Image (cartoon, rainbow, N blue to C red):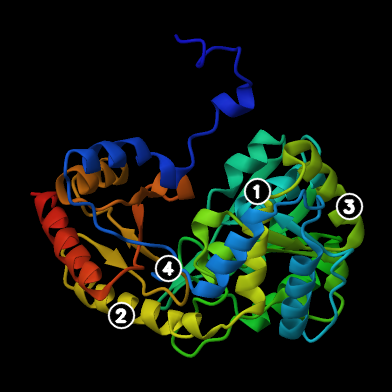
């Protein structure tokens, strides 16, 4: 046993996996060095960064400053105005907005600020990699299975309410949902509001894919419902909304007492976020938006093209997602585990996928469908070949 597997390492860290989407990152690099053709699939819009963002970053790099731990005032102001327009209300940029290094750090900061040992978090399942974060900070994840009908996945609100206990601190809402692509409708948000009020719960609403909604649907915000401002924490990312994944920018909108606690955590974690990246993020929010106007249509077209192929592939099954950038595919009919299938997809077919075990659904895999149309066509061809290779005889 190496010292990194020994009790020297905190038990809570030993017991959690790597982030699911990063499990194969070293192998991907090695395969690329060998000249392997790895499909350029993306979870964010495929865009060259526009000039106004590059220029803002370049100017900031010439005269960098140490920004406040809550984030640049002008960035917080711009975000407060943007979110305020979306919910039809006013957001205080000085008391209700905090800048983070991406939405994942925002979630981790929140959990550190809110959870005492043994506090429970209700999370619909399958789910993003929230539960390992809960474990590291000493909380307990209560994973509640989603319901499945002819249209796909949906929240099982009765089962969610039955899971609430005196130790429940908050309900983790994710819409559009990762990995299933479920978009939570307003009627469900209204029921969640009733549960939150009845049981005195906080709602952490992760809306990192808010612009990726398809088939004429609308992204609804629980923050916009009457009475929810005082018990809702909004978590968002610049990765998908503004195609700025590598810049690692995110933000929280929360009631002042919660934001004050989160600010403490940010200070002890990294003091503040990168100044140059914040100036670039500010330019993205206040600058021209036309470069992003076609994002939903592009992702919807990719989704439609991929699902036309998936319907014909023996051994794979899937519901068409209502939102988000992922195909969520059932591989239980194959003669191989989802983890083994992901590994063979990468090594033999150049497709990077994430095994369902990281989402509490071991019979599935998750694959992004962002990218150029020709890349999505290749993805369909390679999935068909991989499935054929591993069909039960």
Report the disc number at residue 304. Answer: 2
Q: Would you say the residues marked 1 and 3 are in contact, meaning their CB atoms lie under 8 Å apart?
A: no
Alpha carbon of mark 4 to alpha carbon of mark 1: how far? 20 Å
Q: In this view, does 295 lie to the left or right of 331?
A: right
| Front residue of this view, candidates 249 and 141 | 249
Tag 4: Cα neighbours inside 10 Å, few (<14), some, or many (≥20)? many
Quadrant (top left/top right/bottom left/bottom right) for the N terminus = top left
Q: Label 3's element?
A: helix
Percent x, y for residue 331?
A: 27, 55
Label 2 – label 4 distance at C-alpha: 12 Å
Of callouts 4 and 1, the N-terminal one: 1
N-terminal of the pair, mark 4 or mark 3, is: 3
Q: Name the residue under label 1.
A: 105
As helix, strand or loop, the secondary structure at mark 1 comes to: helix
**In front: 105, or 358?**
105
Instruction: Confirm or deny contact between disc 1 and disc 2 (CB under 8 A).
Output: no
Q: Position of residue 58 (x, y in %)?
A: 58, 60
Cα distance in 3D space between marks 4 and 3? 33 Å
Q: Which mark is residue 260?
A: 3
* Residue 152: x %, y % from top left: 43, 73
List the single residue furthest toward the right.
257
First-in-chain label (3 vs 2):
3
- Residues at marks 4 and 3 touching, judged by CB atoms closer than 8 Å: no
Q: Distance between the residues labelled 3 and 2?
A: 44 Å
Residue at 71%, 83% (x, y): give it: 86
What crowding class fits label 1: few (fewer than 14 Cα within 10 Å), some (14-19), or many (20 or more)?
A: many
In primary-sequence order, the first of circles 1 and 3 is 1
Report whether residue 126 is seen: no
Asked whether the beta carbons under mark 2 and mark 4 sit within 8 Å of each other, the answer is no
């Amino acid at each position: 046993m190496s010292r990194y597997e020994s009790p020297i390492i905190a038990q809570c860290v030993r017991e959690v996996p790597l982030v699911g989407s990063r499990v194969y990152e070293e192998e991907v690099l090695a395969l690329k060095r060998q000249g392997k053709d790895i499909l350029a699939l993306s979870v964010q819009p495929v865009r060259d960064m526009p000039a106004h963002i590059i220029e803002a970053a370049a100017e900031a790099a010439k005269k960098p400053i140490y920004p406040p731990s809550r984030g640049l005032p002008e960035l917080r102001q711009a975000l407060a105005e943007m979110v305020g327009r979306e919910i039809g209300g006013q957001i205080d940029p000085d008391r209700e907005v905090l800048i983070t290094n991406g939405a994942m750090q925002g979630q981790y900061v929140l959990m550190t600020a809110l959870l005492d040992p043994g506090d429970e978090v209700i999370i619909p399942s399958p789910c993003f990699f929230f539960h390992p974060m809960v474990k590291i900070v000493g909380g307990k994840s209560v994973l509640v299975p989603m319901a499945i009908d002819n249209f796909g996945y949906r929240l099982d609100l009765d089962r969610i309410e039955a899971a609430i206990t005196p130790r429940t601190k908050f309900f983790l809402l994710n819409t559009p949902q990762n990995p299933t692509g479920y978009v939570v409708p307003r009627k469900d948000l209204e029921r969640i509001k009733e549960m939150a009020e009845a049981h005195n719960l906080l709602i952490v609403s992760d809306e990192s894919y808010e612009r990726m909604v398809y088939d004429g649907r609308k992204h609804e915000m629980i923050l916009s419902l009457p009475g929810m401002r005082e018990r809702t924490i909004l978590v968002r990312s610049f990765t998908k909304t503004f195609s700025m994944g590598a810049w690692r920018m995110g933000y929280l909108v929360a009631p002042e007492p919660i934001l004050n606690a989160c600010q403490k955590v940010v200070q002890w974690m990294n003091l503040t976020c990168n100044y140059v990246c914040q100036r670039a993020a500010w330019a993205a929010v206040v600058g021209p938006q036309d470069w992003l106007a076609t994002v939903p249509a592009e992702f919807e077209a990719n989704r439609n093209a991929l699902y036309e192929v998936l319907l014909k592939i023996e051994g794979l099954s899937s519901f068409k997602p209502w939102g988000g950038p992922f195909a969520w595919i059932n591989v239980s009919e194959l003669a191989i585990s989802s983890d083994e299938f992901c590994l063979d997809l990468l090594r033999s077919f150049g497709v990077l996928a994430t095994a369902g075990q990281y989402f509490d659904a071991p019979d599935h895999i998750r694959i992004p469908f962002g990218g150029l149309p020709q890349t999505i066509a290749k993805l369909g061809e390679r999935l068909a070949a991989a499935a054929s290779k591993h069909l039960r005889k």
